[in-house]
Every structure is written in structure tokens, then in C-alpha cells.
Image (cartoon, rainbow, N blue to C red):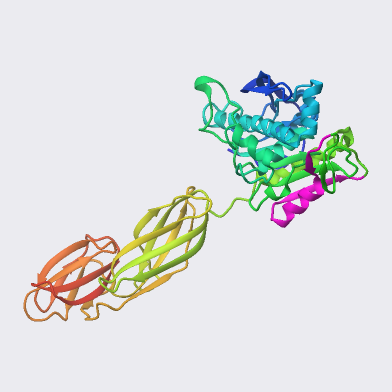
Amino acid sequence: MPDCSAGRYTADIFADVTRTPNVVFGYNTAVNYSTGATTPVTLQFDFYEPAGDDPTVARPLIVLAFGGAFVNGQRTDLDDLCRAFARKGYATATIDYRLLNPDFANLLAVNSNPALLADEIVRAANDLRAAVRYFRHDAAVTNTYHIDPTKVFVGGFSAGSVAALQVAYTDNVTENPDAGIQAAYQKYGGLEGDTDLAGADKLLPTYNSANLAGVVNIAGGINEVSIITAGNPPLYTAQGTNDEVIPYATCGAVYNTRYRLCGAVPLQTQASQVGVDNKLYAISGGTHSSPRNAANTAQVVAEAAAFLQPISCPTAPLPVVLAAFAGEVRATDCTGRLTWRTATEHNSRSYEVQASADGRKFAVVGAVPSQNWPAGASYSFQTGPLVGSQYFRLKMLDEDGTAAYSPVVTLAATCLTTPLLLAPNPARSQVQVSGLPAGSTQLLLYNSLGQCVLQISAEVVATLPISNLSPGVYLLKAVSIAGAAIGSARLVKD
């Protein structure tokens, strides 16, 4: 269960943090681009959580990747960030990802060939995706880390943040116009990549890294801002306005390379244009490393935590948002068909269909299970034969037992027009039927599902015993021995 108590995720409500180091989450190979040689790599993370936290709490998780130009750095570089967020109640992890071989010829090849640096960025992104899959698998199977798999944030510093942005905003392998990025995704198994555990422990393709909750971007950038589109994860960014490595206000070549990245201002502009929630901490006069000095790091953590809190603890959505509710009567048999469409569904259990003869007193005539689909769904319900005007509404039931009602829809049937006289109506135990022709007549009583619940023979007048019937609206039809329709009436059973 989530914990959204006062101060959680924004204040330092935990004094101590527990660290679990050296957890293996995947295997792959690093490559020397100048020679083609590959080296096996074991990828690990260090996990941080609030000490003494309630083990029943499903915590949002922040997965961070270190900086170092894809050449230097190690996961312990972000120990301070992980601890700072964990003291506020988040679960955090700092991960390994594959680095470039420091061989001079290899670095010269990469820095002079944008396609090779694009290849390295995708490799790092694939490693980050594998870490997300690992945590989601754990949440589904052993729940060692007590995280909410729907509230996973990614981020990092510098190169690590470049990888995180690539993960968060790439929705398919051809979305990015960079040919080098596209080629790398295709080369390494598609969007999820090929970093995985070994043998029977493989998590692909069962688990994925899609639908992330947000991004914490510290001095990172992305090669093409157009891949940030409506519906993508919210974005928090911190960057120095005089960043000498990744351009702050424009898109341009990364320091000492020919590779193009877009910094904070283009990121924020694009996110705002497509409706992606975002916040920018611009460090006036700051350089590339400025977000990581002590004072700025404290500000970054405070702002990012506040930005992520409403995502981690959103205001509870309405179980159902109804987009449309309508009905129609079939002229051939006077049956009704109700249709409705929802815009969103959260923790929705079912739709109870209710009918009324007068628009005031409703009775249940059926139920339809909810698909509980966040993006909404479509439904229909078939009624029995109708006489005159009948009123319908939906009782929309939530998983916790609460309910809301739809507007009322009126269906008017005109295909059966010969009236029978019923008294009393509404009735509890029996009802007198008159207006029948001379000669033998069959009386058929149908419930709102179109099921015949009573059948008797009559001449001129008849008495219907209805004490054993459920309350609701019924249709009484009179037919001749040959089956020709004689008349009909609507009966309300109290």
C-alpha cells in the first residue's frame, strides 16, 4: 500500500538509511570500437531505503545513473543523492552501466563519429532499462525491495542523465530521427535492449521498462527534443546556465565530440509545448558540475522531491469518468440496447443497470463487469421487450464499495400499442388483467432481461400471481393461440 502521510517524500522524515550493495541485475558486453574486441560486463546496483520503514508500504523508486562522459565514474558517485531521497521516504538505486574503453584510439573513434557515441548512449540506456525490469520483476515475485512498480523514476547526472532521458522519452525504435540511434536499437534487440540476467533468470520479454513515472535530469541532454511527446513522463531538470559540456539554452555539439545534445531550455520548451509537466532549476552562471556542489545538490533534492511527490501520491482519481451513455429501441421486437463509454476507469468493479417505470423508483435489471481500463472502455446491455417509456441509469460500483450514478436515459417503445388494463399497478402479490378479447388468450410475463417468468391462459379477464417475483419492471404480452400479438402492458412489481 502507498504511504502518503504528511511530509512523506518532501521532508527528511527518516533519520537513517539502509544500503544494500552489489546486487547483480544484468550481464552484457562492452566493446572497443577501434578494434571490435568485446569484454563481458556484470552490472550491479546499490539499493537504498529508509531505515525502519513500514514493510507494507509500496514506495516510489528513483533509479539513478552516474556521470563521467561515458568513460569515467562509478555508481557510488551518487551515494549522497540516493541517501538524500531515501531520507524523504523514497526507495533509490544507483546503477552500473557499460562505459567506453579508455583506450585512446577507441575514444578518438567515438568522439569523432556521432554514430558511435549514439551507439554507446543506447547501450547505457539499455542497461538502465534492465535495472527497471529487475525491480518490476521483484515487485511481482518476491517483493524484496517493497517498491511500487507503477511509480518508477529514472535520472542521473551528466552522461547518466543522457541515458535516462533516452529511456524515458523513446517510445519506439524509429521515433528518434538520428540514424545512429535507430541503428543501435535495431542492433541490440529493439527498444528494451539485450541486457538481461542469464539462463532461467532472464526477464525479457516478460517484463519491460515502459510507462515510467518521471525523470530527474541533472545536467543531461537529449539529441532530439521532438521525441518528447504528449503523455510522456514529467521532467525535472537542473543545469548551470554556463554549462561548458552540454549546451544549456540550445542544441549543439557536446564538448570534445561531434555529437549533438539539447540542454535544459530546449527540453523545457518542448515539454511545455506538448503538455508534459516540467520544472527547471536554472543555476545562474553555473557550469556543468555546479548542480553537484553541496549547496546546489541540496536545492536539487528538495525541488525534485517536491516535484515527484504529487506523482507519487496523486489525488485519488474518480473511479469512473463517464464519457457517454445512450440507448435505442429495436422496432422489430421492442427490446432496448443501452451503450456507454468511459473516459477513465480506476479501481472500478462493475456497472449495475437499473430500470424504472416512472423515473423515480429504480430496480436492478442486470450488471456488467468493469474492464477497469485507465484509458476507458465501451459497454452495452440488452434489455427485454419494452412498453411505452422506461427509464434507465447506471450504478457505477468501485472496488471499495462506493458508488456513483449516471444520468438517466429514457427509452420510448412504440411498436406494441394495444393496451391491457392492469390493477393495481404497481402491485405486490397479484394483479388483475382486463381488456382481453373473447376466446382463449395466452398471457406471457417477461422480466427486463427478456426471460418469460410467468405464462397462463385467460379469457376476457385474468389474475396474475406475482408474489414470488423480484421487484422490478415487467412486460405483459397477450397473444392468441396462433401466436399473434393482441396487446401488452408494463407491470411494476413492488
Q: Residue 426: x and y, percent?
A: 28, 72
Q: Is residue 283 magenta?
A: yes
Q: Residue 374: x and y, percent?
A: 53, 50
Tell me the magenta residue range: 257-284
- Image quadrant where residue 80 sits: top right
At a point 20% along the width and 67% down the height, the residue shown is 445
Q: Is residue 3 magenta?
A: no
Instruction: Find the residue positioned furthest to the left.
Output: 439
- Image quadrant where residue 434 sits: bottom left
- Tell me if I can see residue 147 in this picture: no
At a point 57% along the width and 33% down the height, the residue shown is 189
Q: Is residue 30 left or right of residue 395?
A: right
- Image quadrant where residue 431 sits: bottom left
Q: Is residue 368 left or right of residue 402?
A: left
Judge by depth and name the residue closer to the eye, 51 or 321: 321
- Which corner quadrant holds the C terminus? bottom left
Judge by depth and name the residue closer to the eye, 406 or 473: 406
Judge by depth and name the residue closer to the eye, 471 or 37: 37
Q: Residue 384: x and y, percent?
A: 28, 65
Q: Is residue 153 left or right of residue 303?
A: left
How many marks overall?
A: 0
At a point 55% along the width and 30% down the height, the residue shown is 137
